[in-house]
Image: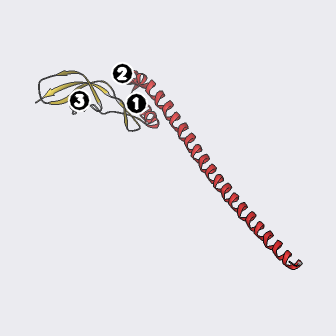
């Protein structure tokens, strides 16, 4: 083998080695890019999960607070019905309740009894149709869901 042939052989093997190294590095780069994409996706999922947990905790705290003020609302309702001077409070109370996502369950005398939103504590009569005779305690919706059923006295009619 002459000198030129040796150089050509060495150049060929050098090119093969360089190509092999380049291919190996490209594979490693692709692997690292995929790892980075997975890490970013994992982080984004984690961030969303933490945000969702914070929202759920806020809702739970707000719900617990609203639930604790129900006895106070009952007392205010009784005071307003007993003292006409307190009637102006009703509008302010209704506005505050709306801001909290709280609304009263309609349970007027003569309305049909609905076990999903009413709790019957007394019943009188022998008929098939159950109607509300009297509301003993106001029920409330919270963000459209029943927070507390209205406590009612039921009258059975034919």
Q: Residue at x 52, y 33 (%)?
A: 57
Q: Which quarter of the rendered picture does the N terminus lie within?
A: bottom right
**Label 2 element class:** helix
Q: Earlier in the sequence, mark 3 or mark 2?
A: 2
**Label 3 element class:** loop
Question: Quarter of the image holding residue 87?
Answer: top left
Q: Are marks 3 and 2 in contact (CB under 8 Å)?
A: no
**Front one among 99 and 91:** 99
Q: Which residue is mark 1?
A: 90
Q: Residue at x 63, y 55 (%)?
A: 34
Q: Earlier in the sequence, mark 2 or mark 1?
A: 2
Gap between marks 2 and 1, in whole Å?
12 Å
In percent of width and height, residue 62 lies at 49, 32
Q: Earlier in the sequence, mark 1 or mark 3?
A: 1
Q: Residues within 10 Å of mark 2 (few under 14, many from 20)?
A: few
Q: Which residue is mark 3?
A: 109
């Amino acid at each position: 083998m002459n000198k030129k042939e040796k150089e050509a052989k060495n150049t060929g093997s050098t090119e093969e080695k360089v190509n092999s190294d380049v291919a190996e590095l490209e594979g490693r780069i692709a692997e690292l890019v995929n790892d980075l994409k997975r890490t970013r996706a994992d982080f984004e999922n984690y961030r969303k999960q933490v945000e969702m947990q914070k929202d759920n905790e806020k809702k739970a705290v707000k719900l617990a607070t609203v639930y604790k003020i129900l006895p106070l609302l009952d007392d205010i309702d009784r005071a307003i019905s007993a003292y006409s001077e307190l009637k102006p409070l009703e509008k302010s109370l209704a506005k505050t309740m709306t801001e909290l996502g709280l609304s009263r369950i309609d349970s007027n005398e003569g309305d049909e009894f609905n076990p999903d939103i009413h709790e019957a504590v007394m019943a009188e009569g022998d008929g098939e149709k159950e109607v509300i005779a009297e509301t003993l305690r106001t029920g409330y919706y919270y963000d459209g869901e029943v927070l507390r059923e209205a406590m009612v006295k039921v009258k059975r009619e034919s």
